[in-house]
Image (cartoon, helix red, strand yellow):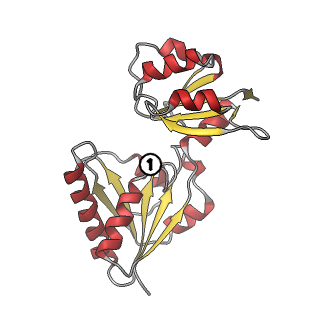
Amino acid sequence: MNPRLTGVGVGPGDPELLTVKAVRLLQRVAWVFYPVAAPGAESMALRIAQGYLDPARQELVPLIYPFGRGPAEEEAAWAANGRAIALRLGRDGHGAFLTEGDALLYSTFLYTAEGFRRAAPEAEIGVIPGIPSFVAAAAVTRVSLGRRSDRVAIVTGGTGVEDALASHEGVVILKASRDWEGTLAALRRCGRSGEAVAVTRCGWPEERIEWDVEALSGRRLDYFTLLLVGRWHL
């Protein structure tokens, strides 16, 4: 057998939104790796999955990801984390890497898997999908992002927002705190402010939903805020 690392999407915040497949794997592996921003910092991914883990028989390993410190330092961290995982898994170990939302959508697992593969070329990579934040947000707000032949776009704040609003019936704006005032201006120009809803920290106890997005003008948004724009509400 070869070493194997499985990226596990743990969903947006509610522990009950983990898939059965994810829970079964997390209860089986001996190593569970999770991202942190600094030594001793809290991991949202670990917090979500904690109730399904057993520290008495599993090794829970924090890995530091210094995002925002420049490409050189970030890439060095990815390589170091890949080597750290390879060292623990050895020749045939199986570990899981926790990531918020889905493992292949803006996830630290993407960088981790690359570093691990370089450190252990014979390794196997697996993925268990998780519920993305915007899917969970659509559920709590009952906003339908697409019907029949509707077009749906997923963008990030500050990049292609107005084009998406003008040409798609359903629009998801992730990382909405980026250029928030620019996004509001685009909503106004496209006449879609009334179709938008902002969701912050979806699935967490501190979850907030704001239907009047204009009321957020001039305010600093939480990093974990997304915007849904849809023409159909249940």
**Residue 24 at least partly seen:** yes
Q: Vertical placement of 173 versus 101: above or below?
A: above
Q: Position of residue 124 (x, y in %)?
A: 44, 76
Q: Position of residue 22 (x, y in %)?
A: 55, 62
Indicate the quadrant containing the N terminus: top left, top right, bottom left or bottom right: bottom left
Question: Dot 1 lies on which element?
Answer: loop
**Closest to the observer: 8 or 17?**
8
Residue at the (49%, 69%) spot, across then down: 126
Q: Is residue 11 left or right of residue 223?
A: right
> Quarter of the image holding residue 125?
bottom left
Indicate the quadrant containing the C terminus: top left, top right, bottom left or bottom right: top right
Mark 1: amino acid: Tyr
> Quarter of the image holding residue 57?
bottom left
Q: Is residue 86 left or right of residue 180?
A: left
- Write down the residue under mark 1: 106
Residue at the (41%, 84%) spot, across then down: 2
Q: Is residue 24 left or right of residue 103?
A: right
**Closest to the observer: 182 or 26?**
182
